[in-house]
Image: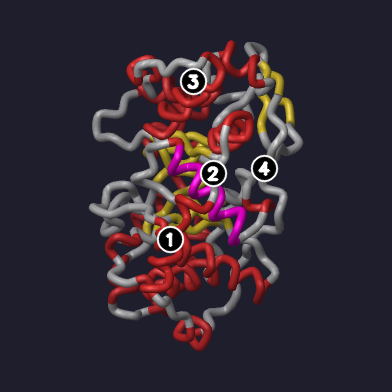
Amino acid sequence: MLAPQEATLQTTASPTMTTTQLPQVQEQRNDGVPLDLDWVMAAQANTSAIERRAKTLPGRRSVKKDYQAAWLCKAISLMDLTTLSGDDSEGRVRRLCAKARQPVAQPILETLGMEGLTTGAICVYHDMVPTAVDALAGSGIRVAAVSTGFPAGLSPFHLRIAEIKESVKAGAEEIDIVISRRHVLTGNWQALYDEMKEMREACGDAHVKAILATGELGTLRNVARASLVCMMAGADFIKTSTGKEPVNATLPVTLTMIRAIRDYQDRTGIKVGYKPAGGISKAKDALVYLSMIKDELGDRWLQPDLFRFGASSLLGDIERQLEHHVTGAYSASWRHAIG
């Protein structure tokens, strides 16, 4: 039933179930380049122009009916289903992992022809990594861990590096690290580069997402420069926010960061991923972000190895929209609990 923007699916069998997932990690990994301060300082951001462009985006692309359902299924496959609460427990993480395996009711997926659809990954605190790895065994769904003194990133540096290594040892395949915002705010780009590079090395084979905490960086120019420095130091993804800041993912910030990604690819030939996180809770918002990525970076970024949503409540709203598409009726939000 669903044709728009479908990708080749890979099937993974386990003793209990079969899941179907989009292929992951196909591109050459970003090993980084030497810090180029001329390039960094040349990066500018025309805030008024960026904000004008961002305001037009929600009205420029409109998809309906089967096309909308296809894009929403795509959004699910690109989701880092996340729980980062102080009261997280093994039971909650196992429920979230079950949701990642079966994000939408089976009858709905069968009607849509999307049986076996899963989320892209699960994102948890370090202490919950072994539980998530066990719960997702055989599913092909990746486990991501937030590390480096998340969310503030102000613990001693050697402890942040040790936390990365412990998360990788526990089975995390992706590490979401937080940068030291003070390096950006003071313009100490060498310090940011060195920090990011050492964190990248500590990750080993695990892919690293650099969280910029854009709501605390002051200006879009700082966002653009921090994005470039983190990519130069070897970040596999750049990510907007921890989800704990007063302002998280926004369209102007996204436009700034993905244009930095495009600039980096133009100069190095290397594709770097992007992850907006925090504040994206509605299906219609996900459609806007996906259309922006398609317009600015192209179809290749509409795959889970180059784009992720950091989200929890977003999945519930997408479920409601898909159920409405199939049945013609909206269900109550409490019927789509997460975790």
Q: Is 314 situated above or below 205?
A: above
- On the image, the x and y values in percent for residue 176 come to 44, 50
Q: Is 252 situated above or below 74?
A: below
User: Which residue, given by chain and number where applicable, does mark 3 sit on?
Assistant: 324
- On the image, the x and y values in percent for residue 302 come to 63, 47
Question: Mark 2 falls on what kind of element?
Answer: loop
Q: Upstream in the sequence, badge 1 or badge 4? A: 4
Residue 294 falls inside the magenta stretch: yes
Dot in front, 2 or 3? 2
Question: Mark 1 falls on what kind of element?
Answer: helix
Q: Upstream in the sequence, badge 2 or badge 3? A: 2
Label 3 is placed on what type of residue? His
User: Which residue, given by chain and number where applicable, does mark 1 sit on?
Assistant: 54
Location of residue 273 by image quarter: bottom right
User: Which residue, given by chain and number where applicable, does mark 4 sit on?
Assistant: 24
Mark 4 nearby-residue class (10 Å; few <14, some 14–19, many ≥20)? some
User: Which residue, given by chain and number where applicable, does mark 2 sit on?
Assistant: 62
Q: Upstream in the sequence, badge 2 or badge 1? A: 1
Measure the C-alpha gap from mark 4 to mark 2. Answer: 28 Å
Measure the C-alpha gap from mark 2 to mark 3. Answer: 17 Å
Tell me the residue at 36%/18% (across/down).
91
Judging depth in this view, the residue of 223 and 191 nearest the camera is 223
Label 2 is placed on what type of residue? Ser
Residue 312 falls inside the magenta stretch: no
Measure the C-alpha gap from mark 2 to mark 1. Answer: 15 Å
Magenta part of the chain: 284-296
